[in-house]
Amino acid sequence: MSERDNLMHFRPEFDADVDVCGCVVSPLKTSMMVMDVSGCPSVPGTDEMEGLSAASGDSLSQDQKDMLERCLHALSHAKNDSQTLAALLLITRVCPASQLDRVTLRRVFEAVGLNLPARLLVTAVRGDTSSGLPAQELLSLGSALLAALSTDPDMAQHQQMLGTLPMLLGLLSDGPAWTPQKQRTPQTSQQKETGASPSKSNGDHSAQSSQPSPPEVAGEESGGQTSPSSAVVLNEALASDCYQVLEAVLVVSGGPERLLTRGAIPALCRAIGQSQTLSGQRGRPLLGLLLSQLGLQAWERHSAQLRAVLERLSREFCQAKEHQRLELCAELVQFLPPQEGLLERGALKRLAVELWAAVRPLVQSKLSTRQLGPVLALSACLLDLCGWDCVGPPRFCCLLVNRACVEVRMGLEEPPGTDMSLDLQHWLTACYRVMEAAMEQACSQGLDDNSVQPQTSLPGLSLQQSRQVLGILEEAFSAVIFYLKQVEQSRHGDPFVFATFRCLCAWLAEETSCLKEEVTSLLPFLIGYSRDHLQGGGDLRDLSSWMADMSMGPGSRKNKWTGEHALRYLLPALCHLTAEEGPRQVLLSLDLLSLLIGLLQRGWEGLQKQEVKAQRRDPALETACSALLNIAVTEPDKVRKDPSFSELQKLLDDALPLLLHKPRLLVLAANFCTLGLMLGRTKVTPSDLTDPGERRFFSAALRFLLGALGSAHGSPPGSVAAAWEEGWDEVGELWSLSLQALGACFRGRPGLMALVREQSWLANILSTLSIRGSLTDAPTLEALQEALCALAQMCPACRDEIREELRGGQASCLKDMKQLRRAVSQ
């Protein structure tokens, strides 16, 4: 007996006047979904033992309960597909959808399984006519069942459900005439997950055990237009069911990645490009959510298709009326590439120019916070992509920064205890990014002759406009400080607090003269917040997981998120603050040393675990060294008495010898060398090198400093060694400072003289200088002279060696060192 005959056999039990498709499909779509108050499908919980809902337990009569049990028994013991469908229909007639509790739904799901709807779809897309039903009815029935089953999270991530995704995506992108042969690439890995090949349905449960998988489908898309068959309009109910399944898969664990590997992005792009059924109402929002979750992964794999959708949406945005643009801002943000380089530079700039032209009137309008928030969020994303070049005239740049700062002041200067909505937090975070972008461009290297304020380099700004921008930023950051002072420790895991903290750190990294008293009073919070993140625990672990999911850095899928991020953001500010007396004393009282030294230790351990070719600079370690160097220079008594510095010296003793053989870490080696020598010069009484660690450090320091001059024949006169040339702008000043500290160490540690003689350090220096000629860099010459003078004063043999070299008449560099010549002539 055929499938259609089986269904007709049961029709008198239902309604002899109702069509088969009407009997089965329509009731299923309304009964198997749990509908929330907005009319959208909501996903039931996964706990089978939650019990019946109050509505289920109270509203059903005993006769209804008995009948429901008989129907469930018939469903679980059905011998073929027709009996399964009949039992399903009876359940929908006995118990309305709103009265089905989760336990009952799970029993229905387990009885029906995923084999039946999968086989219905396979039969339809292969054009198999043995079922006796048209393909459209099979598609409607299969998709309705899948949509109902997908409301259970366990079903939504079942391998058989995932195996049907390419077919559902094909229907959404190409319409009901889609066939597997339209895909161009080979079978992908998802078919291997489902196991068996498609088989024809015969109504027996023996056929269901084979677990048929869909025909060959592809996860990639060529980007071209589909065949003319795509003109066939997809039934709206069928399209709605397909989107229901995709939306259910999206929200389960790993759902975005599963949709990505099964070709969801190119299929949705194609559906949107051809204006397929519901593609605008549900396809575009679904694609936007996918991009929000996947970001870089999606753009790297499907940049051509996503660019087409972005250009389509951008045209719609630019051509829309003002009130429509306000509605489109939040959606457009989701479709922007996560970083520069994913689109051609010319295409990206053209797109940015067009979008800014449409955004400018919105920024200039009188809008409420709820209206302006999405506009500022879009502006922040455009700034991230293209900077200030495409924003517009200087007056508009000032206006944009001003509006962001005003929103921050209005949002943060509320009385303590005021609850802030999630939308407002999101919009204020966008304002922070506008402020950060302004700060990144605002402070130039020099100062104006008539002002102590730094100039700005925003495009075309006058000096007066620059001062206005800095004044507006100062007021906004005053509000940020006010807000952070109210934050309790229990809220250290709040993502919005972290965004506010990060924004303030960006400002403190650039601005060192404004709000000094306010910043100093906030230091206990800043250090305590950073320390809490390092220690982790509780809500902070939740924040770490959330930030790891949200962060998508250049060149990697997702940046590894650790508890160090808060301290790393604060480090540049600490460099400035440790150079000033008042803030430095507060920081020392807050045990800043343990934080910085602990960061260095963990960072060095991490570098040692990396392969040599994979080792990369860690700017945070270099910045931490700069802050410690400020303390070592300004607080010699602290260096001599605090045991933390002894711990730091041991780290430097072990690390510097190893760094000599890591050319990729030249800047870190220069920092370690300088810091260690600065610590070494604080010895009050002369001492020998009796400690093996100290001897190892100073031996490495001598070799490192000599390495900057290179071999006698390796570099032209007046230049540094070839290996140092690329990084000389960064390490040159450290090298000079190291030589000055080395001279002080010569005077305080007589044991160094023997090490210098043992390594022939002075002989190598003199030999290099005699061949290389004059050093054109005056600071380098002065630093070298200071070290040689100290050596000449402390070591008679060294003094004689220098004097002999001067008499030879070849070392023109030495002849330029007048102070050295006086020292050896005595």
Image (tube, rainbow, N blue to C red):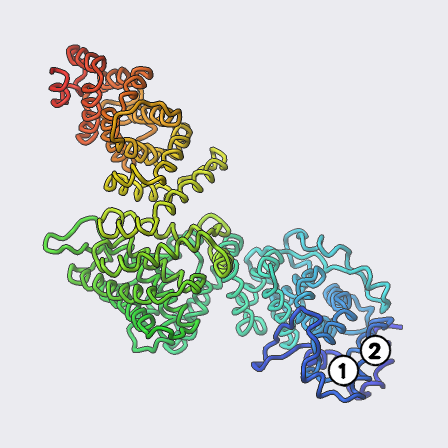
* Figure quadrant of residue 40: bottom right
Residue 627 pos. (x, y %): 30, 44
Identify the secondary structure beneath mark 2. helix
Residue 83 pos. (x, y %): 84, 75
Residue 343 pos. (x, y %): 43, 54
Residue type at numbered disc 1: Cys
Bin the neighbour count of mark 1 within 10 Å (Cα to Cα): few under 14, some 14-19, many 20 and up. some
Q: Give the residue displayed 66% in from the left and 52% down from the top.
A: 188
In the image: residue 238, left or right of residue 16: left
Q: Which residue is mark 1?
A: 23
Q: Which residue is mark 2?
A: 7
Residue type at numbered disc 2: Leu
Identify the secondary structure beneath mark 1. helix
* Figure quadrant of residue 784: top left
Q: Nearer the viewer, residue 535 or 109?
A: 535
Q: Give the residue displayed 25% in from the left and 39% down from the top.
A: 637
Q: Check the image and report above or below for 324 versus 207.
A: below
Give the mark nearer the N terminus: 1 vs 2: 2
Residue 247 pos. (x, y %): 60, 68
Q: Check the image and report above or below for 733 versus 179.
A: above
